[in-house]
Amino acid sequence: MTAVIALTVVLAVFVGVALGLLGGGGSILTVPLLAYVAGMDAKQAIATSLLVVGVTSAVGAVSHARAGRVQWRTGLIFGAAGMAGAYVGGVLARFIPGTILLIGFAVMMIATALAMLRGRRSHVESAEVQRIPIAKVVGEGLVVGLVTGLVGAGGGFLVVPALALLGGLPMPVAVGTSLIVIAMKSFAGLGGYLSNVQIDWTVGLMVAGAAVIGALLGARLTAMVNPDALRKAFGWFVLAMSSVILAQEIHPAVGLGAAALTATGGLCTWRAAGAASVRCGDSPVPR
């Protein structure tokens, strides 16, 4: 094992830890890890990331299924539509330059980060599961699957809200069901890519195994950290990583501009949080 591959595997453990802690989002770092650390070209990195995301999501779905947090009917319908879209996306990727795919991935990173900074809203608190509108979920699955197949992102930040809103699933069930959908879409997208891209299966499975170990470890650490603070910190980190990709694939000035916006936004958020804390601390205390 070369030093580069060893470093990639070690970093994949941390990607998995983020995935286990946050219940999603860690896979958004897999493509940059494979492209800029392992040195894979864009399409090979995306294809390999689909393998890693698929394996990690499938393993994560097992624990949710055992706990009864998977709605199989909804997940299989959404997943089947997503598989069709993901396969088409993987096939279409052969006609799109790798640089464009990585820029699209950076856009997905920005969207994911903003969604994480906003936080998840539990639209449905009742344990009662509504019947999902088939036409809507098929359309949503096709679109999300197409994006997954093209750029290699699992799309969990799109799948979870869709399952909660369209399917009326309680948030814990939406999260568990989304892992089934993401695994199905990722393997279908990988199938589309394999029609024109060769991947190193040994490296891919090593990275996937490391990510699974990290995800299991992260899941055990969830009780020891503040999930809201962690989610927001990870969101800012993903925004910073998107700046690196934009700098590499478009122009350093674009990356610096994006990094400056991220730093400004983070500083303003930190100052606003500090001001709110001071206001709370200054509230009068009755004597």
Image (cartoon, rainbow, N blue to C red):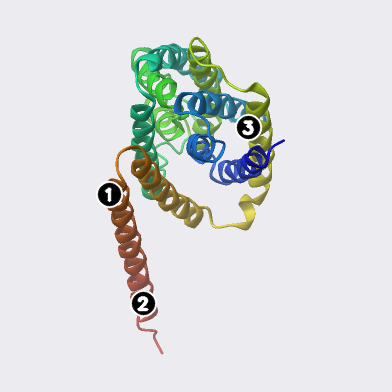
Q: Earlier in the sequence, mark 1 or mark 2?
A: 1
Amino acid type of disc 1?
Ala
Question: Measured from the top left, where is residue 27 in percent x and y?
Answer: 52, 36
The residue pinned by badge 2 equals: 278
- From what the image shows, is residue 258 above or below residue 111? below
Sooner in the amino-acid sequence: mark 2 or mark 3? 3
Asked if disc 3 and disc 1 are in contact, CB closer than 8 Å, the reply is no
Q: Which mark is residue 60?
A: 3
Q: Is residue 141 left or right of residue 181?
A: left
Residue visible at 68% across and 25% down? 202
Q: To which quarter of the image does residue 135 belong?
A: top left
Between residue 104 and residue 156, name the one nearer to us.
104
Q: Secondary structure at mark 3?
A: helix
Q: In which quadrant of the rendered view does residue 157 lie?
A: top left
Q: For the C terminus, give its image quadrant.
A: bottom left
Looking at the rendered structure, the kind of residue marked 3 is Gly
Q: Does 266 appear above or below 204? A: below
Quick check: can you spot residue 67? no
Q: Nearer the viewer, mark 2 or mark 3?
A: 3
Reading the chain from its start, which is encountered first: label 3 or label 1? 3
Residue at the bottom extreme, as displayed: 287
The span from disc 2 to disc 3 (Cα, nearest Å) is: 41 Å
239 sits to left or right of 47: left
Q: Nearer the viewer, residue 186 or 263?
A: 263
Task: Name the residue that disc number 1 marks.
Answer: 253
Q: Residues within 10 Å of mark 3 (few under 14, many from 20)?
A: many
**Dot 2: few (<14), some (14–19), or many (≥20) neighbours within 10 Å?**
few
Q: CA distance from mark 1 to mark 2?
A: 37 Å
Query: Residues under labels 3 and 1: Cα distance?
Result: 39 Å
Q: Quadrant of the N terminus?
A: top right
